[in-house]
Image: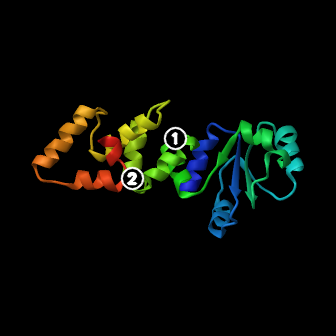
Amino acid sequence: MSNIKETLVKRFEDHRIIFWYNEKKEEHIQAEYEAIDIPEVEKVQVQGDAFAVKYRVQKQAPDGKFLLYFTGQKPAYEDNWLLDLELAHYVFHTDEAAMFLQEVGIDFHFKELVMQHIKFFKAKDRRQKLKELLGEGDGHRAIRYKMLAVLFNLDTINLTTYLHAHGSAFIQEKDQMDKDLESYGLKDFYW
């Protein structure tokens, strides 16, 4: 199962309607959309028929699940016939940082955090370990502390434990932790 399909399946557990914009009209994104087949989810490529789509999802199939796919620029709020549905449901993003956010399970407003530490998120094992550590309501600071736990290969989220692990590596003349702190953009936060 592709990452996109896996993420969509997970999102459909909590959302009835998912909006997916391919604003750059990327062919590989279009191909991903066309290849996706999720049981009990109706795929609809919206092409200038927003009012008919709205009628379909609200009146004809009010309990159905829909993947609404759009190519081209996302309409301005005042021109968006589906804005109420979009705000009430879920918008799926397919850029690299957004895919990492969705895989780890943190909200889209943390996208800037992911962009600042993009090298950290590029490794699937680090993303998986971070996902296991994350809790409901974690903020920027808590997420970064948990990223440090992943970096130091610790299960305890505690500055004293980090300092102990870092000091032990220093005594053993291993500088990989320092390189990783620098590489993943966590050096300033740590110190």
Q: Amino acid at mark 2?
A: Phe
Instruction: Answer with left or right where residue 45 lies relative to residue 190.
Output: right
Disc 1 residue crowd, few under 14, some 14–19, many 20+, Cα 10 Å: many
User: In this view of the protein, which residue sits in the foreground, 168 or 32?
Assistant: 168
Q: Which residue is mark 1?
A: 106
Residue 95 vertical position relative to residue 158 in the rendered view, above or below: below
User: In this view of the protein, which residue sits in the foreground, 107 or 124?
Assistant: 107
Residue found at x 30% / y 47%: 151
Instruction: Answer with left or right where residue 138 lies relative to residue 73.
Output: left
Where residue 28 sits, quadrant-wise, is bottom right
Residue 158: mark in rendering: none
Give coordinates of residue 153: x percent, y percent: 27, 44
Can residue 2 be seen here? The reply is: no
Q: Earlier in the sequence, mark 1 or mark 2?
A: 1
Residue found at x 89% / y 49%: 52
Residue found at x 44% / y 54%: 118
Can residue 11 be seen here? The reply is: yes
Residue 120: mark in rendering: 2
Q: Secondary structure at mark 1?
A: loop
Instruction: Answer with left or right where residue 69 lies relative to residue 7.
Output: right
Give the CA distance from mark 1 to mark 2. 15 Å
Q: Quadrant of the C terminus?
A: top left
Q: Which residue is situated farthest in the top direction here?
A: 137
